[in-house]
Image (cartoon, rainbow, N blue to C red):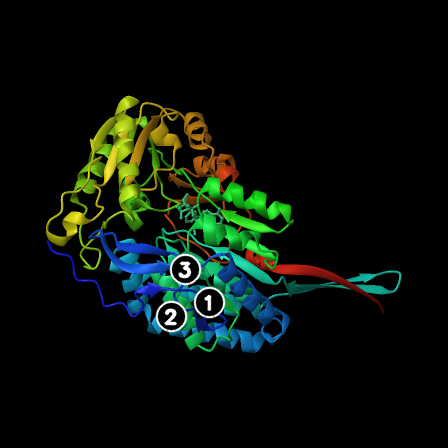
């Protein structure tokens, strides 16, 4: 099969966009690849510390002049809704750029992720119209009024696995509450987000409110996080990077939220609707090409149902259509980079070395034509010997499921919680007491019961333990992106 030829890119050189202006391409260059073919499709022009400084200064000016921070809620809502409409109008274009850069299927990007990116702006437009304040009347004849104000300049750092869906959540929340920001996408996936920031300006966003700089983490990201003009940091990415960013932020006592990795348990009891649990188990590990923080990567099965469940899972995994992500028929595209493919595949050997059985996959998927150079991996499933095996502890971040079996509720909970991570848990059972007990006992920021990956934006999202610090969504976003001030006056 041949790859659908990549679109002619409007921007083959991905530069910074600061204060509404495209910067000339002057920095260090990095190649940007199409993971389905392994061919270079664009060039990233890296922002150095001086360019990051320009971006922070532009955001600072746009914040300090007050036009955005003190804009009426109604006008800011109009702006956010205009952005929502603009993104939807350009959904196909954004999905195509993301697909070219990431290799996730066009169908998934068009129907889910780009729609979500647009919706994030509508959600916060509606949210800011409904915020409430507190008033306390004191008996001594004073009244205290609690007001929330924007914090200032936000540094927003995004990962490569769902660039536009994740970064748009940060941008929408930051600007909805009156902040200005500098966005730094992953150096692997700058294309769609660069166009996204252009679209914000085309929708009428004033210059300087959202700026974008591109480049590697230790260069551009580090300069941004260390910049004295940055007031708060929102980071999504790996746990080790998160640790480093929090240590840097601590030097200047800057608040940060960290949305980090996961190794989530998908627990299936014999009392579950097993057909639904099976469908969901496949989606939660193989969608987005398996590259998801919230992947249900450890599938814990009650022993009485395990053999049958695994046999059906493996049969379905082998039927997954691997191919050109531009085609709507494709279910599993390539992994995001050659090095990531090699890392994911190395876990098949690690699994064998630990005594696990590789049930299916564990090898590169053989492709033809242009796709032969792509980073395709077969959907993989292993039966792990114990929960302490590396395939059950390390975040593999690919289409790689590890099965474990349990004999009792207590054993299931022990295994589910025996991880350094705590992002989400999936729970499948129709037995109410089991559900009630497990939702109490599971140590994760989200527990999905008999459903998978349904995200309510009013509810907080984030992880326990090494999966993060802080939460995003609704009131949690309001608390992070605003300062709180108590004004006391005589009555
Ligand atoms: P990463 O930590 O390598 O990079 C994330 C971002 O941080 C990139 O933009 C990178 O350039 C930047 N960065 C790296 N070093 C930096 C530094 N020293 N200073 C400032 N910025 C720096 O992560 P990744 O490989 O891009 O993303 C995959 C990880 O993200 C996985 O662990 C995944 O679980 C996690 N993730 C978490 C969530 C969540 O909501 N919890 C969502 C998606 C992805």
Q: Would the CB of label 1 be found within 8 Å of ligand 1?
A: no
- Is residue 437 something one can see in this rendering? yes
Q: Contact (CB < 8 A) between labels 1 and 2?
A: yes
Comparing labels 1 and 3, the label whose residue is closer to the camera: 3
Quadrant (top left, top right, bottom left, bottom right) of the C terminus: bottom right
Q: Earlier in the sequence, mark 1 or mark 3?
A: 3
Viewed as shown, does residue 107 lie left or right of 367? Answer: right
Q: Contact (CB < 8 A) between labels 3 and 2?
A: no
Q: Position of residue 23 (x, y in %)?
A: 43, 69
Q: Position of residue 195 (x, y in %)?
A: 37, 67
Q: Secondary structure at mark 3?
A: loop
Q: Secondary structure at mark 1?
A: helix
Q: Is residue 307 above or below residue 228?
A: above
Quadrant in which residue 136 is drawn: bottom right
Q: Position of residue 180 (x, y in %)?
A: 55, 66
Q: What distance separates the C-alpha of mark 1 from that of mark 2?
A: 10 Å
Q: Is residue 83 above or below residue 117?
A: below
Q: Which residue is mark 3?
A: 27
Comparing labels 3 and 2, the label whose residue is closer to the camera: 3
Name the one closer to the observer, 58 or 364: 58
Numbered circle sitting on residue 121:
1
> What residue lies at 28% left-to-right and 45% top-to-bottom?
286
Classify 10 Å Cα crowding around label 2: few (below 14), some (14-19), many (20 and above).
many
Q: Is residue 352 above or below residue 324?
A: above
Q: Earlier in the sequence, mark 1 or mark 2?
A: 2
> What residue lies at 10% left-to-right and 52% top-to-bottom?
369
């Amino acid at each position: 099969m041949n790859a659908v030829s990549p679109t002619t890119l409007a921007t083959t050189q991905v530069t910074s966009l600061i204060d509404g202006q495209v910067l000339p391409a002057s920095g260090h260059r990095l190649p940007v690849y199409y993971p389905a073919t392994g061919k270079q499709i664009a060039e990233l022009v890296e922002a150095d510390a001086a360019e990051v400084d320009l971006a922070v200064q532009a955001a600072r000016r746009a914040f300090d002049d007050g036009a955005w921070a003190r804009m009426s809620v109604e006008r800011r809502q109009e702006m956010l809704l205009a952005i929502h409409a603009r993104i939807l109008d350009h959904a196909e274009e954004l999905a195509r750029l993301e697909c070219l850069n990431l290799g996730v299927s066009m169908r998934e990007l068009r129907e889910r992720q780009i729609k979500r990116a647009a919706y994030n702006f509508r959600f916060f437009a509606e949210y800011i119209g409904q915020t409430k304040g507190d008033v306390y009347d004191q008996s001594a004849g004073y009244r205290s009024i609690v007001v929330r104000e924007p914090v200032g300049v936000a540094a927003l750092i995004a990962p490569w696995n769902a660039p536009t869906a994740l970064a748009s959540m940060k941008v929408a929340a930051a600007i909805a509450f009156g902040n200005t920001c500098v966005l730094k996408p992953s150096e692997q996936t700058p294309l769609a987000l660069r166009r996204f920031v252009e679209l914000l300006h085309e929708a009428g966003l004033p210059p300087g409110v959202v700026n974008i700089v591109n480049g590697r983490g230790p260069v551009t990201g580090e300069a941004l996080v260390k910049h004295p003009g940055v007031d708060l940091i929102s980071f999504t990415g790996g746990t080790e990077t998160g640790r480093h960013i929090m240590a840097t932020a601590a030097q200047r006592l800057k608040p940060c939220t960290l949305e980090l990795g996961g190794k989530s348990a998908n627990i299936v009891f014999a009392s579950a609707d097993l057909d639904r649990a099976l469908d969901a188990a496949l989606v939660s590990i193989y969608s987005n090409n398996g590259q998801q923080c919230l992947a249900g990567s450890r599938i814990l099965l009650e022993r009485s149902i395990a053999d049958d469940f695994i046999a059906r899972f493996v049969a379905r995994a082998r039927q997954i259509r691997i191919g050109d992500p531009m085609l709507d028929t494709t279910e599993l595209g390539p992994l995001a980079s050659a090095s990531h493919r090699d890392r994911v595949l190395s876990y098949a050997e690690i699994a064998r070395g630990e005594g696990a059985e590789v049930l299916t996959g564990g090898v590169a998927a053989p492709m033809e034509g242009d796709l032969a150079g792509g980073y395709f991996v077969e959907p993989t499933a292993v039966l792990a010997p114990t929960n302490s095996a590396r395939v059950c502890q390390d975040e593999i971040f690919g289409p790689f499921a590890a099965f474990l079996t349990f004999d009792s509720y207590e054993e299931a909970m022990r295994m589910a919680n025996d991880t350094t991570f705590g992002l989400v848990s999936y729970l499948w059972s129709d037995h109410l007491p089991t559900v009630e007990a497990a939702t109490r006992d599971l140590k994760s920021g989200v527990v999905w019961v008999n459903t998978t990956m349904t995200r309510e934006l009013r509810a907080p999202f984030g992880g326990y333990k090494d999966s993060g610090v802080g939460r995003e969504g609704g009131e949690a976003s309001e608390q992070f992106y605003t300062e709180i001030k108590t004004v006391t006056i005589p009555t």
